[in-house]
């Protein structure tokens, strides 16, 4: 499953892969700016730890992690 979330001019691409029945491993990737080189391994997919997660939690945790990474890059929202 895949979802794209817009945040502060970036896109957070979240991908879930089945790990068990109704449980998913999750990765995210941030796209949309020339400043991406500082996020992750050259803007590649970042796996989230401590999973697997339910579908709802997987999307929520990935969105929050992606937003936090963007906030680190840009500073607090004004």
Image: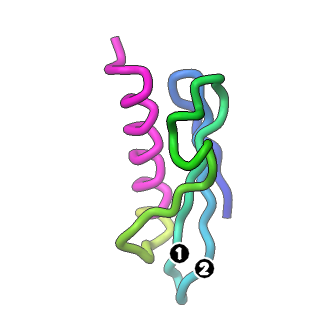
Contact? badges 2 and 1 (CB < 8 Å) = yes
Q: Is residue 15 above or below residue 72?
A: below
Q: Horizontal and vertical percent for residue 72?
A: 37, 30
Magenta stretch, residue numbers: 58-78
Q: Residues within 10 Å of mark 1 (few under 14, many from 20)?
A: many
Residue depicted at 53% across the width and 75% down the height: 24
Q: Horizontal and vertical percent for residue 1?
A: 67, 64
To which residue does mark 1 refer? 24
Residue depicted at 42% across the width and 21% down the height: 74
Residue depicted at 51% across the width and 39% down the height: 39
Mark sitting earlier along the chain (2/1): 2
Q: Is residue 46 above or below residue 70?
A: below
Residue depicted at 63% across the width and 60% down the height: 15
- Secondary structure found at label 2: strand
- Secondary structure found at label 1: strand
Per the picture, the main secondary structure of the magenta-coloured stretch is helix
Q: Residues within 10 Å of mark 2 (few under 14, many from 20)?
A: some
Residue 11, by quadrant, is: top right
Q: Is residue 54 magenta?
A: no
Q: Nearer the viewer, residue 60 or 26?
A: 26
To which residue does mark 2 refer? 18
Q: Horizontal and vertical percent for residue 53?
A: 43, 72
Q: Is residue 3 above or below residue 48?
A: above
């Amino acid at each position: 499953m895949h979802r794209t979330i817009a945040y502060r001019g970036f896109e957070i691409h979240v991908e879930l892969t089945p790990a068990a029945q109704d449980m998913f491993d999750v990765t995210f990737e941030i796209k949309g700016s020339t400043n991406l080189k500082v996020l992750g391994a050259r803007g590649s997919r970042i796996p989230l730890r401590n999973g697997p997660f339910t579908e709802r939690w997987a999307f929520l945790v990935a969105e929050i992690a992606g937003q936090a990474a963007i906030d680190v890059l840009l500073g607090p929202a004004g």
